[in-house]
Every structure is written in C-alpha cells, then in structure tokens.
Amino acid sequence: MFSNIGPVQLLIVLVIVLAIFGTKRLRTLGSDLGSAVKGFRSAMNEAEQQTEQLGDASKKDADFDTTPAEETHKDNKA
C-alpha cells in the first residue's frame, strides 16, 4: 500500500500538515511525544530492575529448621 509513495508525495503531505497545524504546534507535539517515550522507557527500566530484584530475593534458600508452630508448641511444653 505504501510502496508507491515517493519523495514528492511525502513532501506534499508534509506541506499540507504544516499548513493545517503550523510549525509551533508541530514542535510542541514533537516535544510532548519525545517526553512520553522517555517516560515510557524509564518506567520499563524501573519495572525490569524490580523484577530482577524480586528474582534475586526468591533465589535465597528458606530456613526450615523451625517454624512458628513448632516454637509455640515447645513453649507450651516447658
């Protein structure tokens, strides 16, 4: 569908978009889009770091020598 779009057609579309929106509005739209992408990337990095931290914490072995039920049972016998 887009294979027959050449540089001349793209230039015409660009001129029409500039005429409709103006340069100031396109500039603010570009900066808003850039900040949104930057925020999305930082959120993804934070999520990956939290996932790695949770994965590291789950790799530790649990201490199964005594359980709270056994401790209370020993206290009641004494």
Image (cartoon, rainbow, N blue to C red):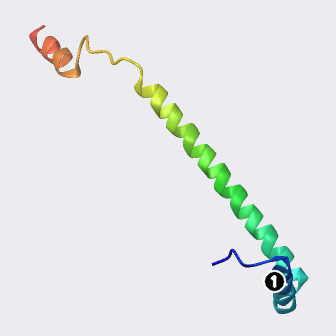
In the image, residue 53 sits, relative to residue 36, either above or below, namely: above
Q: Which sits in the foreground, 19 or 63?
A: 19
Estimate how packed mark 1 is, as few (under 14), some (14 to 19) or many (20 or more) residues with alpha carbons within 10 Å.
few
Label 1 sits on a secondary structure element that is: helix
In the image, residue 3 sits, relative to residue 22, either above or below, namely: above
Judged left or right of residue 21, residue 60 is: left
Q: Which sits in the foreground, 14 or 73?
A: 14
At x 84%, y 76%, the residue is 7
Dividing the picture into quadrants, the one containing residue 65 is top left
The location of residue 2, given as percent across then percent down, is 67, 76
Type of the residue with mark 1: Gln
The location of residue 51, given as percent across then percent down, is 50, 38
Task: Name the residue beneath numbered marker 1.
Answer: 9
The location of residue 77, given as percent across then percent down, is 9, 10
At x 83%, y 90%, the residue is 16
What quarter of the picture does the C terminus occupy? top left
Q: Which sits in the foreground, 77 or 67?
A: 67
